[in-house]
Amino acid sequence: ISRPQEQQSTNSRSTHAMAINVREVVVLGILTSLGLLLTILACVLPTPGDIGPNWWPIFTVLSWILAPFPVLLLGGKGNFGEASQWMYWGYFTTGWLVAASFGIPAVLAHVQTIGMGNMAMTLAACVIVYGTGGLAAYFQSKTDDTDYFAG
């Protein structure tokens, strides 16, 4: 007799866990969309002076797309769980891709290809998108015992 109650209790727990995961996915999707919206607005909104709207800030999206690949491709462990030199190369490459996504808008604003407002929107988008990636890693670490930030 107690068996169906245990099964019902287990099902309600898994449904609750699934609802939390759906909520987390929705939050991550909204934040990513906000970052992309800010980048597109940085491209299409006119700037003061003779600069005008242009699509140069969209190059930061390319660095967002490329940033995780070095760690994904080179992030394997060596023998007996040791970190390999390729893993460190992946971290280094990811680091300069992330730095480039913040540096591209600054350089474009410095040479007056985009306006300062466009640069601010692009930098805000970078903070939101990379913050979303960190938030996704946090959500993932809550559900399993994987430590994504350990070397």
Image: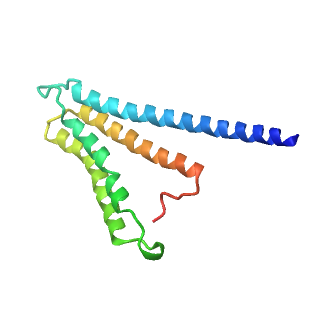
| Position above or below: 42 against 146 | above
Residue 114 found in image quarter:
top left
Say above or below: 137 vs 39: below
Query: From this viewpoint, which residue is outermost toward the bottom?
Result: 80
Horizontal and vertical percent position of residue 95: 32, 56
Q: Relative to 54, does residue 81 appear above or below in the rendering? A: below
Which x, y percent locates residue 121? 31, 33
Residue 99 shown left or right of residue 21 in the figure: left
Q: Is residue 139 left or right of residue 17?
A: left
Can you give x and y, in whole percent of width and height, for residue 84 in the image?
37, 71
The reply, left or right, for residue 127 in relation to residue 57 is right
Residue 76 at what x, y percent from top left? 40, 65
Q: Nearer the viewer, residue 103 or 142?
A: 142
Of the 4 image quadrants, the one containing the N terminus is top right
The image shows residue 134, relative to residue 96, as above or below, that is above
Q: Residue at x 34, y 41 (%)?
A: 126
Viewer-side residue, 23 vs 135: 23
* 98 to the left or right of 133: left
